[in-house]
Image: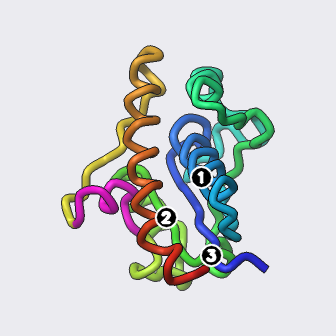
Amino acid sequence: MPTMKILMVCLGNICRSPLAEGILQSKINALHIDWQVDSAGTAGYHIGCEPHRLSQKVAKQHGIDISHQQCRQFVKEDWQLFDKIYVMDKSNYDDVKNMSENFWNEKKVTLLLNELYPNQNKDVPDPWYGGEEGYHKVFDMIDKACDVIIKKYSTIHE
């Protein structure tokens, strides 16, 4: 049984959260940390689809294959399955809160970049409407935040 279960959430589960899942999974695999990582979106636009081609391309350039992932929508029952829920932006935070009903637990959810910039509530920008450069920037932000997550929780949960 994994010792820590983390869910990464963005709007469509096609750009940012699949990258976050892939990056963190790659890092914990390399360190032999027994965690479970998943991702979801607050909207159901892309259910069953693989991640965006540019998310896959940028991940692959870093040696990470996310092509096996399938987009899914966040459900309130995710609160029972995961120890920590990271959202990519304030809108995702509000959507998760609204979708959670009586499962809401503000201690379990935070903006991903709060790991890098505590209490600043910075967003991971959505690269969907831009070019490939935006995906590289998002990858770098998520990568740094994942390093902090591992340092923060691996000493507690190993």
Question: Is 134 placed left or right of 55 in the picture?
Answer: left
The residue where tag 2 is placed is 150
Q: Quadrant of residue 82?
A: bottom right
Where residue 31 sits, quadrant-wise, is bottom right
Residue 51: % across, % down? 67, 33
Residue 53 in magenta stretch: no
Give the percent coordinates (x, y) of residue 52: 63, 27
CB-based contact (under 8 Å), mark 2 and mark 1: yes
Horizontal side, residue 113 vs residue 26: left or right: left
The residue where tag 3 is placed is 4
Q: Is residue 134 left or right of residue 85?
A: left
Disc 3 versus disc 2: nearer the observer = 2
Residue 38 percent across, percent down from the top left: 67, 58
Q: Nearer the viewer, residue 15 or 147?
A: 147
- Residue that badge 1 annotates: 27
Identify which amino acid the numbered label 2 is placed on: Ile
Where the N terminus falls, by quadrant? bottom right
Which portion, as a residue range, is magenta? 110-118
